[in-house]
Image (cartoon, helix red, strand yellow):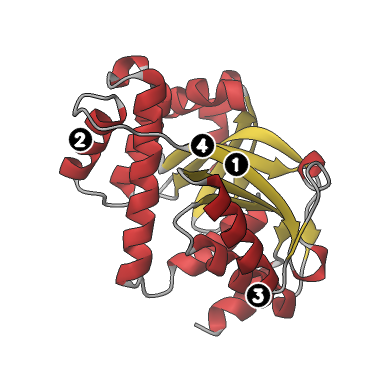
């Protein structure tokens, strides 16, 4: 997961263009709609919705948009929300493993688009199961670094709540838990007075592969192309970046 986090951090430092921001908002709204449909509009009884709303607010999605998405997803506006989750497996440049998670209302469109984007950007599709075995479903909580907050502080807050590890990802700390322990861990952070940016169930690689800067540029180009698809919701990979490669990539911005 650390490779993905470092890629996200690098990308975050670039100027955010309006089209990318709009796509990000749309995907966060889609998450809220699905969470509300599955568990209802009451945040106190729907922890998945709490996490979806938290992530949207941290990304500056307007409150009115969030409220409308909750009502729409819960069926309170008479509108129908019908999305399917599909996972595609593939390889990027130099055999980097990729899981592409789509949330779509048209499976045929999503499949065709992912396949086209992969082939045009140095990737290849893989058979079901050939990549997924290298990933495990985990809870991933991202904590922004704040003055005086140390890795030990974060670990101390979540250790008894089922956290498996806490890693320093540069601008953030990342807490990894079993997916079933994520709510307990984020609650423990809140009780300790530690704010968190996001809490998501994600696919974390069991084995990470370190890549050089040239490969990283190609992988980022592929991931960026896939992320531009409205149907692609999340992308998981097994690459990792050394501090030297990270510094080289950041110097190019």
**Of pointers 1 and 2, the one earlier in the residue sequence:** 2
* Mark 2 Cα-neighbour bin, 10 Å: few <14, some 14–19, many ≥20: some
* Mark 3 Cα-neighbour bin, 10 Å: few <14, some 14–19, many ≥20: few
In this figure, which residue is indicated by the disc labeled 1?
Answer: 86
Give the alpha-carbon distance from disc 4 to disc 3, as whole Å: 25 Å
Whether residues under marks 4 and 1 lie with C-beta atoms below 8 angstroms apart, the answer is: yes
User: Is label 1 in a helix, a strand or a loop?
Assistant: strand
Determine the residue positioned at 67% across, 69% down. Answer: 219
Q: Is residue 41 above or below residue 213?
A: above
Horizontal and vertical percent for residue 229?
A: 48, 61
**Of pointers 3 and 1, the one earlier in the residue sequence:** 1
* Mark 4 Cα-neighbour bin, 10 Å: few <14, some 14–19, many ≥20: few
Q: Residue furthest left?
A: 64
Which of label 2 and label 4 is nearer to you?
4
User: Is label 3 in a helix, a strand or a loop?
Assistant: helix
In this figure, which residue is indicated by the disc labeled 4?
Answer: 84
Horizontal and vertical percent for residue 101?
A: 59, 46
**Of pointers 3 and 2, the one earlier in the residue sequence:** 2
Which of label 3 and label 2 is nearer to you?
3
In this figure, which residue is indicated by the disc labeled 2?
Answer: 67
Give the alpha-carbon distance from disc 2 to disc 4, as whole Å: 22 Å
Q: Is 206 in front, or is 165?
A: 206
Whether residues under marks 4 and 3 lie with C-beta atoms below 8 angstroms apart, the answer is: no
* Mark 1 Cα-neighbour bin, 10 Å: few <14, some 14–19, many ≥20: some
> Which numbered tag is attached to residue 120?
3
Give the alpha-carbon distance from disc 4 to disc 1, as whole Å: 6 Å
**Of pointers 4 and 3, the one earlier in the residue sequence:** 4
């Amino acid at each position: 997961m650390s490779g993905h986090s470092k890629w996200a951090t690098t990308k975050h430092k670039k100027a955010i263009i309006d089209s990318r921001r709009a796509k990000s908002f749309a995907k966060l709204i889609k998450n809220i709609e699905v969470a509300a449909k599955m568990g209802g509009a009451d945040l106190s009884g729907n922890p998945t919705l709490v996490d979806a709303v938290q992530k949207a607010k941290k990304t500056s999605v307007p409150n009115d948009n969030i409220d409308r998405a909750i009502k729409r997803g819960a069926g309170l506006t008479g509108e129908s929300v019908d999305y399917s989750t599909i996972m595609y497996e593939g390889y990027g440049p130099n055999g980097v493993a990729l899981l592409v998670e789509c949330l779509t209302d048209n499976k045929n469109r999503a499949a065709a688009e992912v396949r086209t984007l992969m082939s045009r950007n140095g990737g290849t599709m893989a058979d079901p199961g050939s990549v997924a075995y290298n990933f495990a479903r985990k809870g991933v909580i991202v904590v922004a670094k704040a003055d005086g907050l140390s890795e030990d502080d974060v670990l101390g807050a979540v250790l008894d709540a089922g956290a498996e590890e806490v890693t320093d990802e540069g601008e953030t700390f990342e807490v990894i838990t079993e997916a079933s322990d994520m709510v307990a861990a984020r609650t423990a952070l809140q009780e300790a007075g530690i704010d968190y940016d996001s809490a998501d169930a994600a696919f974390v690689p069991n084995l990470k592969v370190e890549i050089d800067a040239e490969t990283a540029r190609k992988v980022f180009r592929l991931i960026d192309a896939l992320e531009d698809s409205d149907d692609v919701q999340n992308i998981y990979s097994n690459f990792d970046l050394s501090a030297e490669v990270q510094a080289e990539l950041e110097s190019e911005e």
